[in-house]
Amino acid sequence: MGYTDKHAVRTEILDKATKAFIHKNPDSVIVNIGCGLDTRYSGLYNGKIRWYDLDLPESIKFRKQFFKETDR
């Protein structure tokens, strides 16, 4: 199994765990530390949770070139 395959499996595991957490806690707060270019928010956002993507200033500056901040 190559790096890409491992990354895809890890992503699927994290998505499932996050989705289960949101299902049990629909009004929760999620803090994604070391978010990089992670897109989990866009696929799992339920319209209620507060989601914070955190990273180092340089990474956030780079991230802002690709993603818009939202009120949530």
Image (cartoon, grey):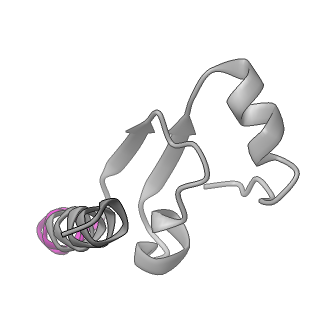
Query: Which x, y percent locates residue 5?
Result: 28, 72
- Residue sitting nearer the eye, 37 or 21: 37
The residue depicted at 40 percent of the width and 75 percent of the height is 44
Seen in the image, is 58 located left or right of residue 36?
A: right
Q: Position of residue 71 (x, y in %)?
A: 70, 54
Judged left or right of residue 29, residue 62 is: right
Q: Is residue 34 above or below residue 37?
A: above
State the quadrant of the N terminus: bottom left
**Image point (24%, 74%), residue name:** 12
Q: Nearer the viewer, residue 38 or 19?
A: 38
Dividing the picture into quadrants, the one containing residue 4 is bottom left
Residue extending farthest top: 57
Magenta region, residue range: 19-26
The residue positioned 54% from the left and 65% from the top of the image is 39
Q: Residue at x 49, y 75 (%)?
A: 47
* Quarter occupied by the C terminus: bottom right
Q: Nearer the viewer, residue 59 or 9?
A: 9
The spot of residue 55 in percent (x, y) is 57, 28
Query: Is 72 situated above or below 52?
Result: below
Q: Is residue 23 magenta?
A: yes
Q: Is residue 18 magenta?
A: no
Q: Residue furthest front?
A: 2
Number of numbered discs on residues: 0
Q: In this image, 34 relative to 37: left or right?
A: left
Residue 11 is drawn in which quadrant?
Answer: bottom left
Quick one: 14 or 45, which is closer to the camera?
14
Q: Position of residue 35 (x, y in %)?
A: 51, 42
As drawn, 50 above or below 15? above
Magenta span dominant secondary structure: helix
